Image (tube, helix red, strand yellow):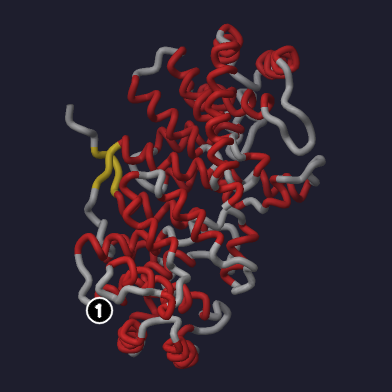
C-alpha cells in the first residue's frame, strides 16, 4: 500500500524547532537564526544535497538536548556550567530516530573547538560541526535591543578572534565574505525568517508521511517529558492510554495512529513553561496557574501551523476543555469537543492520577474512580469514555504502567545521568 504523504518536511522541522525557542524573548528564533547563518555559510562553501540538508537540520535542532527553559537561557548567555551536557543528550535523543541518526554526531560536536579535531574539513561531520559552532556563536553575539546594521562590524571583529583555534580559518573567511552583504543581516533578523528558511532551505518541497510524523512526535514526546523527573513518563502514559482507549472505542487504524501522535504532542506547549512551575511541590499561585494555562494554547497553534494536521491539533490541544465549557484555553463545550478530544481529556486526567507528583503519590483505583466519575457526573468528562476506561481498567492501567516503565528506564539509564 502506498504511504500517504500529508506534511511538508520543511514546515514540520521549522515549526517544531520554533517550539523549543518560544520560552523566552532572549532566545526566540535562536535555532532559526543559527540555521540561517549555517545555511548561508554552507552554501557559500559549495556544500550541496544531503550534506547541506544535514547541516540545516542539525542547526534547527542543535539545542535539542537543552531540556529546560532555564538551561536554554544559560546556554544562550554563555553562563552554562557544562556546555557539553546538552550536546550529549542531543546525540542520545536523535539516535532514537532512524532518519535523524545522520546528524547526531554533528549536534554532539557543535561546541568542539577546531584545535581538538584530528580530522580536517574533508570530514563532513567536522565541516558541519564547525559551521554550526560558528553560526551558533554569531547568533549569540547579536544584541536584540540594537539595530542589526549598527553592530555588524563589532560582530565581525569578535568572530575574527575565533581563529585562535576555536574555528577553522577558512570557515571564518566564508562568514566574513558573507557579512559584507546587508541582505544577509536583514534576513537574519527578519520577523518572517520562517518564510525565508522554508523557501530557501533544502526541504521546501519534501513531503513526509504519517509514519515519519509519528517518529518525530516520539522525539518531541521525550523532550516534553524529560524536562523534569516528575514528568518523565507523563506524555508516554497519555499517548498510550489515549491510543488504547481509541482502539477500544473502535477507531480505524489510521485514526489510532493520529491519536498516538496527538498524545505524544499534547503537552508540547509545556516546553514554554519554566521548571520552577512544573516542579513546584505545592499549589500554584494565581500568577503561576495563569502561565500554566497557556500551554494547551501553544500546543494547538504549534501543531496546526505545520499544515495537514488539524485533527491532531484539536485532539492534542483540547485536553483541558470540558463539556460544560469551564475548561481552557478555548472554553469549548458540548459538540464543539470531538470524540478524539474527549478521549484525550480522559487519558490526561487518568494518567495524571496514577503518577507520583511532587505534592502526592499516585492514587489507587478507588480514588481514581471516585475523582473521574465525579467529573463525568458533573458534565466535565465524557461519560461513555469514562465507562470504557473503567470497564477495561486493569488492562489499560497495566498497559500504561508498562509503557511508562520503559520510558522511565530510558530516562534513568541515559538522559538522567547524561
Q: Secondary structure at mark 1?
A: helix
In this view, the residue in front, 93 or 319, is: 93
Residue reaching furthest to the front: 118
Quadrant of the rendered image containing residue 349: top right
| Residue in view at x 41 percent, y 44 percent | 96
Position of the N terminus, as image quadrant, is top left
- Percent from the top left, x then y, of residue 81? 64, 68
In this view, the residue in front, 303 or 243, is: 243
149 displayed left or right of 352: left
- Taking the image as drawn, is residue 37 in sight? no
In this view, the residue in front, 340 or 357, is: 357
Task: State whether residue 34 is above or below residue 358.
Answer: below
Task: State whether residue 17 is above or below residue 352.
Answer: below
| Residue in view at x 46 percent, y 50 percent | 92
Task: State whether residue 312 is above or below residue 15.
Answer: above
Q: Residues within 10 Å of mark 1 (few under 14, many from 20)?
A: some
Question: How many numbered markers are drawn?
Answer: 1
Quadrant of the rendered image containing residue 62: bottom left
| Residue in view at x 30 percent, y 50 percent | 9
- Percent from the top left, x then y, of residue 321? 60, 31
Residue reaching furthest to the top: 391
- Percent from the top left, x then y, of residue 367? 75, 16
| Residue in view at x 40 percent, y 71 percent | 132
Disc 1 designates what residue? 44
- Taking the image as drawn, is residue 84 in sight? yes
- Percent from the top left, x then y, of residue 101? 35, 51
Amino acid at each position: 500500500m502506498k504511504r500517504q504523504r500529508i506534511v511538508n518536511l520543511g514546515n514540520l522541522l521549522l515549526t517544531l524547532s520554533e517550539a523549543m525557542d518560544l520560552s523566552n524573548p532572549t532566545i526566540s528564533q535562536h535555532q532559526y537564526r543559527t540555521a540561517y547563518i549555517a545555511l548561508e555559510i554552507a552554501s557559500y562553501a559549495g556544500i550541496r544535497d544531503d550534506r547541506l540538508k544535514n547541516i540545516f537540520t542539525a542547526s534547527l535542532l542543535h539545542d535539542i538536548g537543552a531540556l529546560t527553559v532555564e538551561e536554554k537561557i544559560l546556554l544562550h548567555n554563555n553562563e552554562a556550567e557544562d556546555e557539553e551536557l546538552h550536546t550529549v543528550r542531543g546525540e542520545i535523543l536523535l539516535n532514537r530516530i532512524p532518519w535523524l541518526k545522520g546528524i547526531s554526531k554533528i549536534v554532539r560536536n557543535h561546541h568542539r573547538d577546531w584545535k581538538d579535531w584530528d580530522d580536517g574539513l574533508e570530514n563532513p561531520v567536522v565541516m558541519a560541526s564547525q559551521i554550526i559552532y560558528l553560526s551558533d556563536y554569531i547568533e549569540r553575539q547579536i544584541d536584540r535591543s540594537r539595530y542589526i546594521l549598527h553592530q555588524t562590524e563589532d560582530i565581525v571583529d569578535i568572530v575574527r578572534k575565533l581563529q585562535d583555534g576555536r574555528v577553522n580559518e577558512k570557515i571564518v573567511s566564508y562568514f566574513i565574505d558573507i557579512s559584507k552583504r546587508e541582505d544577509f543581516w536583514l534576513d537574519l533578523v527578519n520577523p518572517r525568517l520562517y518564510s525565508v528558511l522554508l523557501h530557501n532551505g533544502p526541504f521546501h518541497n519534501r513531503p513526509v508521511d504519517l509514519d515519519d510524523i509519528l517518529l518525530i512526535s516520539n522525539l518531541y514526546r521525550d523532550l516534553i517529558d524529560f524536562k523534569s523527573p516528575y514528568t518523565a513518563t507523563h506524555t508516554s502514559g497519555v499517548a498510550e492510554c489515549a491510543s488504547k482507549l481509541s482502539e477500544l472505542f473502535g477507531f480505524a487504524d489510521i485514526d489510532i495512529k493520529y491519536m498516538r501522535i496527538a498524545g505524544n504532542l499534547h503537552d508540547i506547549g509545556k516546553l514554554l513553561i519554566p521548571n520552577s512551575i512544573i516542579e513546584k511541590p505545592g499549589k500554584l499561585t494565581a500568577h503561576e496557574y495563569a502561565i500554566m494555562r497557556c500551554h494547551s494554547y501553544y500546543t494547538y497553534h504549534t501543531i496546526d501551523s505545520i499544515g495537514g494536521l488539524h485533527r491532531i491539533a484539536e485532539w492534542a490541544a483540547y485536553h483541558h476543555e470540558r463539556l460544560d465549557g469551564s475548561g481552557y484555553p478555548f472554553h469549548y463545550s458540548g459538540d464543539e469537543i470531538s470524540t478524539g478530544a474527549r478521549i484525550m481529556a480522559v487519558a490526561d486526567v487518568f494518567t495524571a492520577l496514577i503518577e507520583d507528583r511532587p505534592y502526592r503519590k499516585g492514587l489507587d483505583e478507588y480514588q481514581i474512580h471516585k475523582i473521574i466519575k465525579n467529573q463525568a457526573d458533573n458534565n466535565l468528562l465524557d461519560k461513555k469514555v469514562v465507562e470504557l476506561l473503567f470497564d477495561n481498567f486493569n488492562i489499560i492501567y497495566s498497559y500504561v504502567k508498562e509503557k511508562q516503565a520503559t520510558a522511565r528506564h530510558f530516562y534513568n539509564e541515559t538522559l538522567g545521568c547524561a
